[in-house]
Amino acid sequence: MKFYLTTPIYYVNGRPHLGHAYTTVIGDVIARYKKLKGYDVFYLTGTDEHGGKIEKAAKSMGKTPKQLADEMVVHFRDLWKELNIEYDFFIRTTMDFHEKKVAEIFEKLKEKGYVYKGSYSGWYCYNCESFVPEDAEEENGVRICPDCGGKTEFITEENYFFRLSSFQKPLLDFYRKNPDFVQPATMMNKVVSFVESGLKDLSITRTTIGWGIKVPSDPAHVIYVWFDALFNYVTGLRDKFDKYWPADLHILGKDIIIFHAVYWPAFLMAAGYELPKKILAHGWWLVNKKKMSKHIGNVLDPKILIDAFGEDAVRYFLMRETPIGQDGNFSHESFLERYNADLANELGNILSRTTTMALKYFDGVLPSPGPKQPSDQNMEDSWKELSNQIEELYDSYQFSRALSLLWDYLRSINKYLVETEPWRLGQKDSQKTSRILLTALRALFCVLKYIYPVMPRSTEKILEAIGGKGIEFDWDAYKEGLKIKEVGKIFPRVDKEEFFKEEIKMEEKKEEKTYVTIDEFFKMGLKVGKIVEVKEAENANKLYILKVDMGDHERQLVAGLRQYYRPEELLGKKIVVVSNLKPAKIRGYESQGMLLAADVNGRPYILQVPDEVPPGTTVR
Ligand code: MSP
């Protein structure tokens, strides 16, 4: 009864956001549920710290990749702590044992002939350090990088290749024998058709990237970051490998399904390991219909929600709002509505009604109840039926559906209380009141078993309050005589208007910052100029003194371009000038305006104007 589950390891080029939290929360809910069911669980998470992405991000911040990783890893660990994630090990791919093992596996595959040296030709973007896809747009016969929009160069690189093409048949056989390998089924179909359409050998080293694990027998080559990263699932088990391998469940987002469902099993087959049992692919959290991502800049820091609502509310929302596999649109409004309706109202009401009456009428200890009535039997029977259904849904990772049914049941408990009106009876008929409260509390107690994996801390508080701690989750196990205590509001209602007042204030501030009116924009005197002279500034080695023809006059601009452009590259260029910028002295030289350039991590790319546009033309 072992269960080994993993999250992807997260890139350390930025702080964690709600999308990362989602994958890790799903893992934690499953890990806790499996533990409840008696499994010996191992839950692995960690960070992916090598490769060009991290190298580039670090460079733009003036840090070494390791410094950046060391800083970022703290944010991930902190967030997992705040979200109450109970992982068993946090792997970093810069850990010694991982690097050694990956290099060893690489050499083994080389010896076995699964890895060979070849050459790869393609259009390469030096800015992004990656080959651009075949269908990238072209301009004058040169491919344009879809990520940064820069020009690429056709290069031929010597690489090591993995014989992925030989695994087409073994993979298809494996999928046929394990049709549920990938969940949901739509993703499985995508994977099968990807493999059916043919597999090319995969380049698994880079010579253009320095930050990564070197191939021991050929150290000019650095192992491709995905080969390195995927093996974390093996190395992360360390001395527990024999006990826990193969993985029972890899949880990941749909964007990285091909890496996990195609490359990963192929690497494992080649290296002689057993294959993982299941891959669970979830959808994306979108903000304004776009995937939340650092690249787009629409990320949501989960800490803000945790501070305002507590970690359990965040966990609940993530698990309840969208079924795993589908995309979810995040909005504060839907978060708040769900919080108030499900947690503050439905769950909060049962708890406060039952505990308040138990304390008021019986000093917190329910006396012996009167004989069971059909309405009590009804609650019990419907729970027994529902609990089987919930087990099935949890076992197949359909948490959203399960939670929706559990909340229907909570609603029925509140309805039962409203119909039986124990507050009218009070101590007058203590047997009857006790029976009603006991039925409601038993029903709540049973539901808590399934709420626990999703909201562990709050569940423990509720169990403590109703005297149910340490008792096996079973209808009859919760009895009269237990000590019920005063409990404050676990999920205090958050007033929508107040909340949005704050939100709107934030939005308004943002608007002030990010928008300019069209009139404001037109105040900028953008004009075309032509560079007619380039001189190096004498006392500043980064600056050029440019003479620019503006159509009806010439003017002088001072620009920090010396590191990036040679004088002959600038001469004759038509550029965009902010012509009405207040003149300023830079290192003793007067600059009468500014030229426009795109800023890619601090490196300027001058905006150029087509040749036929004469100097002095207005730009708008
Ligand atoms: N480093 C790789 C994984 C290597 S695993 C051997 C990687 N890292 S990542 O940081 O970009 O993403 C990690 C996980 O976060 C993925 O499962 C991804 O799907 C998830 N999410 C990132 N943004 C997301 C959303 N907006 N919504 C939901 N999850 C998304 O890929």
Image (spheres, helix red, strand yellow):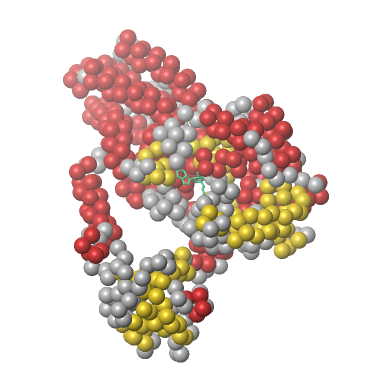
Front-most of residues 602 and 489: 602
Q: From the image, which quarter does the N terminus lie in?
A: top right
Q: Is residue 18 above or below residue 552?
A: above
Front-most of residues 49 and 508: 508
Q: Position of residue 453 (x, y in %)?
A: 46, 35
Task: Check the image and name the residue furthest to the front.
Answer: 612
Query: Is residue 190 shown left or right of residue 507?
Result: right
Q: Give the quarter of the image for residue 594.
A: bottom left
Q: Position of residue 493 (x, y in %)?
A: 25, 39
Residue drawn at (66%, 49%) of the image: 227
Q: Is residue 383 above or below residue 562?
A: above
Front-most of residues 362 and 602: 602
Residue drawn at (48%, 25%) of the image: 393
Residue drawn at (45%, 54%) of the image: 295
Task: Check the image and name the residue furthest to the left.
Answer: 424
Q: Position of residue 417 (x, y in %)?
A: 26, 21
Quick check: can you spot residue 125? no
Query: Is residue 118 shown left or right of residue 576?
Result: right
Query: Is residue 538 shown left or right of residue 173?
Result: left
Q: Position of residue 577 (x, y in %)?
A: 34, 72
Q: Give the quarter of the image for residue 172.
A: top right
